[in-house]
Amino acid sequence: MKAAPRIRVRHAVSALVATSLAGLASFAAHAEIVVSANDGKMVLENGTAVVRKQPLPDTVSVIDFTDGALKLLGEVPAPASVVGPPPSVAIAPDGAFALVTGAMKIDPADPTKAVPDDKLSVIDLKSSPPKVLATHQAGAGAAGVSINRAGTLALVANRSEGTVSVFAISGSTLTPAGKIQLGDAKSGPSHAVFSRDGATALVTRDGDNKISLLTVDGTKVEYAKRDLSAGVRPYDIDLTGSAAAVVGNVGAGSGDNDTISLIDMTAKPIRVVSTVTVGQTPEAVKMSPDGNHVAVTVMNGSNKPSASPFFNDFGLLKVYRISGTELAPVAEAKIGHWCQGMVWSKDSKHVVAQCMVENELIAFAFDGKALTRTSTLKLQVSPAGIRTAEP
């Protein structure tokens, strides 16, 4: 989620009744599941993110994405936010539960404003309907969240206090295991990802233009005192295989074309090796499970005031090929406005993107050369965060 129009608020609501389709639990065992975190608090009004006059409950949606089709399986109310990168959702390796952060809530003292929140919800994906198993406190502005591939540890980047929260995982139970201070409250830790072997983590800091390296040994996580430099405001970051990670540099939001960068995870020490221009505000980046491509949701000025010279009436979904340490453009397709995250199917043949203004998920088929729209799914509130189980 992006800077200027990204104030996000959470609406504490108990009135929403969870919805589901019959047979969710048994069906989900065979389906390819996507989890979308949806912000009911915020709306875009002529380029500015504001609190809705009549806020709706935040929700978490469980969606079947089998064969590129989108089908809502169930929904449950839980704190969510468009503030912070779209990976505000993480799914356990076995698909049993999801973690969802809520970076912002409605200010109790002024319902027209949003203030930082610290909520981390554990969502049971095996129940029908899905349900909230537990709610934890991370740190102020809890944003990007990841689970290691062993399913034993979670990290939460806390944008409003300069920290990363650590949680130990046993089954579906989380236990706080410490907090790492990376910078001051304005350093803006945005998202944290684990290396393939789980021994290293990378944390983007859009407030001071750094990507920090953490060392991981069991539940002991420490700041390695090494920072990478990729571009202006590194925000979303993703890592699929052992060779490379990709980071989106969202820039200053001033209409300039922004960049994504490739990080060589095999280099000693780890380093940024290439950067390419992608357009205005690369909100989300996601590597395909086969490691061959990177998808990017580009705001393309769709979140700017209509009178702005940088406004465009559509966003873009772009795909780049990874060739060694280089990135080459392959395909692009028009999408909606203020679009957020995207995920790949397990076979790397489909991509689904979220668009806030349209309250919509859009699925595309990808044949290695072109993107072809296959289906859409409308939601009651705006989709802001998304994840599948990591390959």
Image (tube, rainbow, N blue to C red):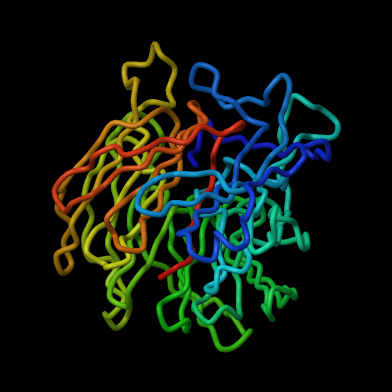
In this rendering, does residue 163 appear at all? no
**What percent of the width, then of the height, locates residue 205?**
49, 56
Figure check: 173 above or below 327: below
Q: Kindly identify the residue that appears in the image at 76 percent across and 62 percent down.
A: 133
Q: Nearer the viewer, residue 125 or 234?
A: 125
Figure check: 193 above or below 68: below
Q: Nearer the viewer, residue 244 or 252?
A: 244
**What percent of the width, then of the height, locates residue 124?**
68, 62
Quadrant of the image occupied by residue 217: bottom right
Q: Nearer the viewer, residue 126 or 132?
A: 126
Q: Kindly identify the residue that appears in the image at 78 percent across and 59 percent down.
A: 135
Farthest residue to the front: give it: 22
- In the shown orientation, is residue 371 left or right of residue 253? left
Q: Kindly identify the residue that appears in the image at 52 percent across and 49 percent down.
A: 63
Q: Kindly identify the residue that appears in the image at 50 percent across and 49 percent down.
A: 85
Farthest residue to the top: give it: 307
In this rendering, does residue 14 appear at all? yes
Figure check: 37 above or below 243: above
Quadrant of the image occupied by residue 164: bottom right
Quadrant in the picture for the C terminus: bottom left
- In the shown orientation, is residue 80 left or right of residue 91? right
- In the shown orientation, is residue 193 left or right of residue 380? left
**What percent of the width, then of the height, locates residue 219?**
63, 84
